[in-house]
Amino acid sequence: MSNPEPDLRSIWSHLDNLEFRQGYIDAAGIRTRFVQAGPADAPPLVMVHGMGGSWENFIANFAEHAKHFNTVAFDLVGHGYSAKPDQVYQVRDYVRQLGGVIDAFGFSKVHLLGLSIGGWTSTRYTIENPDRVEKLLVLSAWGRPRPNETPESRALMMAELAKRLKAVDEPTYEAMDEVFAGLIARPEDRMQDLLAFRLRIYRQEGMPKVMRNVFAGIAPGVWEENMLTDDDLRSVSRPTMVVACVGHPDIFLKNAMEYKALIPGVEWHELHYASHWPQWEEADELNRISIGFFAS
């Protein structure tokens, strides 16, 4: 067929039958955009997205988890539609904001599900606040000492960051597709509406400077102040699961294997058809194992 059907899938198709609320709260002094769904008396679950993203990173997971948990997701400072003060955004800032979200909702103890830098943030929060965390699940693990990286993986990471900066300096659909190629391996899984939504975020006023503040948060020196050392991971005392994308060998898989080796009693689950966004690329399987882990 010369004119194939357009991709009519949308973010809304994951939420159209879900009772939820979206709004803003003050989280440790940051005006924070959030979404919440699920029974108020169900166990609380907080989802923390990846670098450059927003709570919509979890659109394929939110409704399913809300059937079992009082589920909250939010935009990190400098991300999505949360506040964007002119500062370098470090993992310790995300940790402080995460604590503010938990406090704002009045949760005494929560499950945490974190993706990439959200997993790094959730792990650091768990280390520092074990009495506030029930269980921890990490996707696309990150945040380990950089000497553990190979020159090849470092070069790939720098190339990925360059693509991100180009996309925010010149926000076009084509540039966004290049960004998502590093997150979602199969082109058919890069839903047009998902890319269009990120494009709207990147077209906000002042975003080139904001994204440079985001990337400055993982620069040499700042990284070392926030990284997860061997002793840090050995000190994780809450039940933890690490989900590894074993079909996509990269620094995140290497980090996942180090989490596995160091966190006491860690549960390990392998996904074979995902790259960096397993919660999207293998949503049904991820939802199954995540809900099972938190509910067990």
Image (spheres, rainbow, N blue to C red):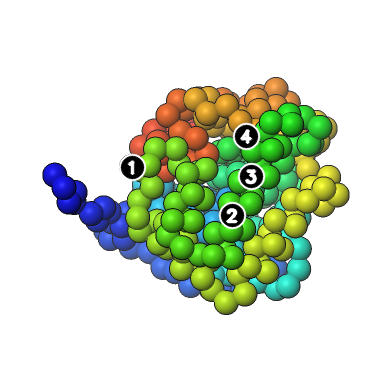
- Check disc 4 and give the amino acid type: Phe
> Tag 2: Cα neighbours inside 10 Å, few (<14), some, or many (≥20)?
many
Q: Dot 3, how many residues are within 10 Å of its Cα: few (below 14), some (14-19), or many (20+)?
A: few
Location of residue 67 in the rendering, given as x and y in whole percent from the top left corner: 36, 49
Contact (CB < 8 A) between labels 1 and 3? no
Q: Quadrant of residue 94?
A: bottom right
Q: Which circle's residue, 2 or 4, is located before the other in the chain?
A: 2
User: In the figure, 30 relative to 126: above or below?
Assistant: below
Frontmost of labels 1 and 3 is 3
Q: Secondary structure at mark 4?
A: helix
The residue at which mark 3 appears reads as: 159
Label 1, label 3: how far apart the Cα atoms are: 23 Å
Res 164 label: 2
Q: Which mark is residue 188?
A: 1
* Residue 214 versus residue 185 in the image, above or below: below
Is residue 106 visible to us here? no
Give the CA separation, mark 3 to mark 2.
Answer: 9 Å
